């Protein structure tokens, strides 16, 4: 176990927090304490806490779910004083290890709702941040609005003072602040969504409006919702990986964590009541995050799904195997050079060619053990967020659709769950119903275009694209992925 006591005597090569834990006061409440949060926000805040005058920015984590897994995690955090180790591994295999102390407490909301509400009302908490996944904002796909009919939302609207969802908690916390004459906090989304702050604003104000329009207006006028681009590959830690990390560090950590050495956080500098000195620890504070988001989503995430879908069909388990296949690597390079980079504007301080190279090198990092199945999961949403804008550009400008057609064909063929080695796997599509699965599994290739992934370009002329997708699906099925790859 890692505890305050063992911090005094860490194995060689493991850095301890550079501050005294007893000096840290909570200033941030974070919902959704997953691996990405631990390797990203907590990593940056850990650095900030070591700077003079920054000890008021400790983080309290909140879990919203009960159940055995949540309890086990909470017990592990408690046993370790919320300390955990982070191994940052470069593509070369070189690693850096440190103990992160930024998380100062962890509360399971269903067990202690009042403790969460007290913190949300406490003026010392100036930022409420969250990593609740892309789907966690409860936005209706069709209307683009906050989905009021959601069961938890209905429950919280009926009992606004004893909430259960993040929306209920945050809005009740803000209500108490307003009534006490205190300031609102910043609501900071750290999810990998375009304009995540705007999405969060829509969600929290949507809930607040349904609860009490006046309160909603107060929140709108007083809280802020900065947009941010977040980036760090942080794989799932299996028990085997945990054992390896501990073996390598010499620690006996209940919650070890691994991430790539690359990390980026670009945040619009719009905070309601102050913020940590993030700019001093490598966070890019900007006025507009748009071009950074485009770069990340259309280059990194878009290439990731190309590699995942193709790799699954070829029988590769991991992203590094996919990128180390010279044909797939060439596909991704040509896609980025020809179809994507010419449509992007480099954000201040960014170089798109260098970014491309870094993405390819990051994918080749064997320590990430990122599974093709995980990266290829929820293709229905990912295709829309990562590929659609590029496809629209190509169709509008009548440019070559060869690579995107191949990508879509690979996605559709991947949904069958069969690889070229004769093996099978189970594609993960959380939004699919039985009906959608029937369409996906049908041999009527025309019917496949009814899938939600294709929504983004229905209004454009996509006949040639459809024809090419169908042709490539036949080739993938009859001759294999390699025969279908564009020259
Ligand atoms: C991945 C991301 O799940 C995915 O689609 O592309 O989780 C990726 O690892 C992160 O966005 C990296 O920051």
Image (tube, rainbow, N blue to C red):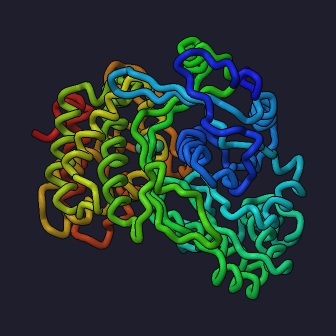
x and y percentages locating residue 298 in the rendered image: 31, 54
Q: Nearer the viewer, residue 206 or 228?
A: 228
x and y percentages locating residue 62 in the rendered image: 75, 49
Q: How many discs mark residues in the rendered view?
A: 0
Specify whether 237 is left or right of 125: left
The answer to whether residue 289 is visible is: yes
x and y percentages locating residue 99 in the rendered image: 61, 30
Q: Residue furthest left?
A: 487
Q: Is residue 389 above or below residue 231?
A: below
Residue drawn at x 61%, y 67% is 274
Q: Residue furthest front?
A: 52
Q: Nearer the viewer, residue 126 or 204?
A: 126
Q: Is residue 437 above or below residue 6?
A: below
Q: Is residue 407 above or below residue 240?
A: below
Q: Is residue 1 above or below residue 224?
A: above
Q: Nearer the viewer, residue 409 or 398?
A: 398
Specify whether 275 is left or right of 448: right
Residue drawn at x 21%, y 57% is 465
Specify whether 245 is left or right of 182: left
Specify whether 233 is left or right of 467: right
On the rendered image, what quadrant is the C terminus found in?
Answer: top left
Residue 316 sits in quarter? top left
Residue 340 sits in quarter? bottom left
The answer to whether residue 151 is visible is: no
Q: Specify the quarter for ligand 1.
A: top left
Residue drawn at x 28%, y 39% is 358
On the rendered image, what quadrant is the N terminus found in?
Answer: top right
x and y percentages locating residue 306 in the rendered image: 31, 41
Residue drawn at x 65%, y 39% is 19
């Amino acid at each position: 176990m890692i505890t305050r006591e063992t911090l005094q005597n860490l194995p060689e090569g493991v850095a301890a927090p550079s501050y005294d834990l007893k000096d840290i006061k909570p200033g941030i409440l974070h919902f959704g304490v997953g691996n990405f949060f631990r390797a990203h926000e907590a990593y940056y805040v850990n650095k900030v806490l070591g700077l003079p005058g920054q000890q008021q920015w400790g983080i309290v984590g909140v879990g919203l779910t009960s159940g055995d897994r949540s309890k086990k995690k909470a017990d592990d955090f408690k046993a370790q004083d919320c300390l955990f180790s982070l191994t940052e591994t470069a593509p070369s295999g070189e690693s850096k290890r440190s103990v992160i102390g930024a998380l100062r407490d962890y509360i399971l909301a269903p067990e202690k709702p009042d403790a969460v509400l007290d913190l949300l009302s406490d003026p010392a908490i100036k930022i409420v941040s969250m990593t609740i996944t892309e789907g966690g904002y409860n936005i209706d796909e069709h209307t683009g609005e906050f989905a009021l009919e959601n069961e938890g939302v209905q429950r919280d609207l009926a009992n606004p003072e004893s909430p259960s969802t993040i929306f209920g908690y945050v809005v009740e916390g803000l209500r108490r602040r307003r009534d006490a004459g205190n300031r609102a906090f910043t609501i900071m989304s750290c999810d990998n969504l375009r304009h995540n702050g705007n999405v969060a604003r829509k969600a929290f104000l949507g809930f607040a409006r349904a609860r009490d329009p006046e309160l909603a207006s107060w929140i709108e006028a007083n809280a802020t919702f900065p947009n941010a681009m977040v980036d760090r590959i942080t794989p799932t830690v299996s028990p085997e990986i945990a054992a390896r990390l501990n073996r390598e560090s010499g620690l006996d950590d209940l919650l070890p964590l691994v991430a790539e050495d690359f990390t980026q956080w670009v945040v619009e500098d719009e905070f309601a009541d102050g913020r940590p000195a993030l700019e001093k620890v490598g966070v890019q504070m900007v006025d507009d995050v748009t071009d950074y988001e485009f770069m990340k989503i259309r280059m990194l995430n878009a290439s990731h799904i190309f590699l995942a879908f193709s790799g699954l069909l070829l029988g590769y388990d991991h992203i590094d195997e996919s990128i180390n296949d010279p044909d797939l690597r060439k596909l991704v390079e040509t896609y980025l050079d020809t179809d994507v980079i010419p449509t992007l504007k480099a954000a201040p301080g960014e170089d798109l060619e260098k970014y491309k190279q870094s993405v390819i090198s990051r994918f080749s990092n064997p320590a990430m053990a990122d599974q093709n199945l995980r990266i290829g999961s929820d293709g229905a949403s990912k295709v829309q967020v990562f590929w659609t804008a590029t496809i629209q550009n190509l169709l509008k400008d009548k440019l070559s659709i060869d690579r995107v057609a191949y990508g879509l064909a690979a996605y559709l063929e991947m949904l069958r769950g069969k690889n070229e080695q004769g093996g099978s796997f189970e594609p993960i599509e959380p939004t699919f119903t039985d009906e959608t699965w029937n369409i996906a599994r049908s041999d009527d290739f025309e019917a496949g275009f009814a899938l939600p992934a294709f929504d983004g370009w229905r209004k454009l002329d996509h006949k040639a694209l459809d024809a090419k997708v169908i042709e490539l699906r036949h080739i993938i099925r009859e001759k294999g992925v390699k025969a279908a790859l564009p020259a």
